[in-house]
Image (cartoon, rainbow, N blue to C red):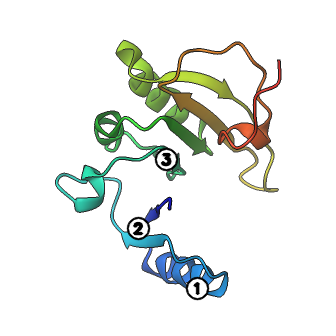
Amino acid sequence: MAQVTGIEGDAASIECARHNAQLNGIANAEFLRADLAHDPGASAWARRRYQLIVLDPPRAGAAALVPTLLRLRPRRLCYISCDAATLARDARNLCADSKLELLAAGVLDMFPRPAISSPSRCSVDPPRRYAYSCANLLGTRKATP
């Protein structure tokens, strides 16, 4: 069975996630508290293998986490950003030296303020020339030609 690991810096958010998992009968999820503004170093979760990582960092981006993400080498990485400049910086570092490849990016107006969120999908899979909708950025739907 697949395992889900949620990592969040806010203790109240961790408690909400645990409560929601319990309410929905989700037994294969764990939620851990960690400050991802700093390199996680030798944390146990940072030594595991992941097929998919969904990353939603604060406006400052995930610069400190990029080396760990590259070391983890997930098959897919969905990076959700509310700041285009930090998304560009982090995507450049994630895709440098062909470590990951940016397969899709989009702009969504998800909230009335701060205005825009930019989901992107990176992958170690070979490049594909497909148009991706927001619904399949996570790889849950097949790409359409």
Does residue 126 lie above or below 93 as drawn?
A: above
Q: Residues within 10 Å of mark 2 (few under 14, many from 20)?
A: few
Residue drawn at (75%, 18%), measured in percent from left and top? 130
Residue drawn where x is 56% and y is 41% of the image:
79
**Residue 53 badge:** 3
Q: Nearer the viewer, mark 1 or mark 3?
A: 1
Residue linked to disc 1? 22
Q: Of helix, strand and loop, which one carries label 3?
A: strand
Tell me: 2 left or right of 108. left
Q: CA distance from mark 2 to mark 3?
A: 16 Å
14 vs 93, left or right, is: right
Local secondary structure at mark 1: helix
Measured as percent of width and height from the top left, residue 75 is found at 47, 35
Circle 2: residue type: Gly
Tell me if label 2 and label 3 are in contact, CB under 8 Å: no
Specify which label sits upstream in the sequence, 1 or 2: 2
Q: Which mark is residue 9?
A: 2
